[in-house]
Image (spheres, rainbow, N blue to C red):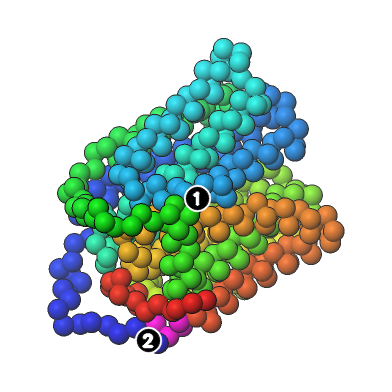
Amino acid sequence: MTQQTVTDDRPEEADRPTVWQSRNFLLLWSGQTVAELGTRISSVAIPLLAAETLDASVFQISLLTTLAWLPYLLISLPAGLLADRVDQRRLMIACDLGRMALMLSLPLASLAGALSLGYLYAVVGISGVLTVLFNVAYRAKLPRLLEQHQLVDGNAKLTMSQDFGELVGPSIGGVLIGLVGAAKTFFSNALAYLLSAVTLWLIREEPAERKPKDATEERVPLRTELAEGLLFIRRQPILLSLLLCSTTSNFFVMASGSIEVTFMVRELHAPSWLVGLVFSVSAVGGLVIGGLTKRISERVGTARVIWVAMAAPGPLYLCMPLAQPGWGVLLYGIGLAAFSANVVLYNVAATSYQQRVTPAHLLGRVNASFLWICYGAIPLGSLTGGALASWLGLRPALWICVIGTWSAALWVYFSPLRGMRDLPESHDVPETAGA
């Protein structure tokens, strides 16, 4: 089935307002940029706090990552239901303020001599719950701040903020930790979440018109409401292919991510500064493509770019297991940069499609269903990567992981997307019945 393009009553591209003219989006974007930077700083500070201040073992430090991602498996679906029922902006502000309080508590507990590994676990776990609630609400809120033709550009700019945080956040975190120590670094995280909450509070929109509840309307069971997001995805062949593609990619990416530092240090004998340089090179790929996403999507097609983004960079992934000692380790950075570019193009287009075709009253639950399954694959992938490396060795395991990552493109290549050029302009898309 091909996507038909409406040309008669559509305004000219030059007459359409851009995201730069949307005060609400600019507030959201600025707040998220600061919050992403704070998150990347904490990604360095938390394990260092556990290792240096609390003298945690390698296994105890690894549990911090598990606790950070576990809430996606446990509460994503009810979080989606909550996001569809409450004011999403207020929910996001509450999550930001909650995370700010948690980050502030770490240096205060350290100064009082009350910081323990158990307390750090609790902070990471509760913060993970608030992050899930925030992300589900934020994904449902964005389409209400932008017009449909602005979604690709808006999602691209938000993704660029993530890459910017990944590029400079760890470096800033390292400098702050060197200057004030790991515990006091969390004051910067608290400030980042406070600024994000302020920008959200400054957003002004027309109050949503609520449909009056019919007294005779039969109450839908909670279990049925939770499943509505999954059922909607199941009836949409393109959404289903996107879900399978993202889940496969996340699984193998985390499998390789769990062994990549060990591979560079033990197999390639790379010093720590060179490992850091590799990750900086990888973030550059996302930043460059992020700035060109709107132009690339218009040239290739806003729907076609989804499977092109997944398939085209695949050969460069092979640079990762081909990396060699010395400066040859930068081959790994080239592979990561290709994947970073893929992530920007794919995520922007896929998220924009999901936001366009999902009815507003289901958006929170559909987003939550994606997070539940896609992010639920992350801890499984991490365990698989470690098991493969222990069984086959680091380089053979890496070959399996990068080929598996590339194979995710098959889900979207063999889907209705291959017959479409551009994304639909409304929620009026065909569904499939049954399985």
Relative placement, left or right, of 393 versus 7 is right
- Residue 417 on the magenta span: yes
Q: Which residue is tagged 2?
A: 2
Relative placement, left or right, of 190 versus 435 is left
Real-space Cα separation, disc 2 to disc 1, in angstroms:
33 Å
> Which stretch did the figure color magenta?
416-421
Q: Which residue is tagged 1?
A: 76
Q: Earlier in the sequence, mark 2 or mark 1?
A: 2
- Residue 256 in the image: x percent, y percent? 68, 58
Q: Which of labels 2 and 1 is toward the front?
A: 1
- Residue 30 in the image: x percent, y percent? 33, 44
Mark 2 residue crowding within 10 angstroms, few (<14) / some (14–19) / many (20+): few
> What main secondary structure does the magenta stretch of the protein show?
helix
- Residue 369 in the image: x percent, y percent? 49, 58
Q: Is residue 91 above or below residue 78?
A: above
Instruction: Describe the element under mark 1 as helix, strand or loop.
Output: helix
- Residue 31 on the magenta span: no
Which residue is depicted at the point 30% across and 75% down? 428
